[in-house]
Structures are given as structure tokens and as C-alpha cells.
Amino acid sequence: VLEKIVKGVEAFGFSSQGWIESPIKGAEGNTEFLVCFCRRAQQEP
């Protein structure tokens, strides 16, 4: 699931700088992740 989300965000011009597992579990005990994205520089036409 994480890879699918990262690829989806990258399709909008962002680059993943890395991710970590959140130290806080979700409401139902599920594992959450924090991802750092940076906008890629736009290329001149």
C-alpha cells in the first residue's frame, strides 16, 4: 500500500525523500507511515 501511495503522489510532480514507521499506532492498532515529499523543479519548455 505504501508503494502505491508514493507512486501516486510522485505522478503529481513530487519526489519521495524517504519514509518512517510512525511511533503512534492508528485507531484500530494499524501501522501508520510518515513520508517526506518534495516538489520536483519544473522544467522550462
Image: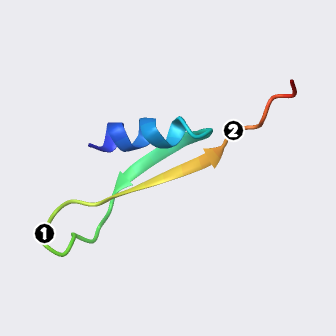
Task: Name the kind of residue labelled 2 in the image.
Answer: Arg
Judging depth in this view, the residue of 13 and 21 nearest the camera is 13
- Residue at image point 56% right, 49% down: 37
- Residue at the top extreme of this rendering: 45
Element carrying mark 2: loop
- Crowding around mark 2 (Cα neighbors within 10 Å: few <14, some 14 to 19, many 20+) is few
Residue 6 as seen in the image, left or right of residue 30: right
Element carrying mark 1: loop
- Residue at the bottom extreme of this rendering: 27
Judging depth in this view, the residue of 14 and 34 nearest the camera is 14
Residue 24 as seen in the image, left or right of residue 34: left
Judging depth in this view, the residue of 23 and 33 nearest the camera is 33
Quarter occupied by the N terminus: top left
Residue 21 sits above or below residue 44 on the image: below
- Residue at image point 16% right, 63% down: 30
Residue 2 image-quadrant placement: top left
Quarter occupied by the C terminus: top right
Which label is found at residue 40?
A: 2
- Residue at the front extreme of this rendering: 45
Residue 43 as seen in the image, left or right of residue 25: right
| Residue 13: % across, % down | 62, 38
Residue that label 1 marks: 29
Which of the two discs, 2 and 1, sits closer to the camera? 2
First in sequence: mark 2 vs mark 1: 1
- Residue at image point 44% right, 39% down: 8
Task: Name the kind of residue labelled 1 in the image.
Answer: Gly
Q: CA distance from mark 2 to mark 1?
A: 34 Å
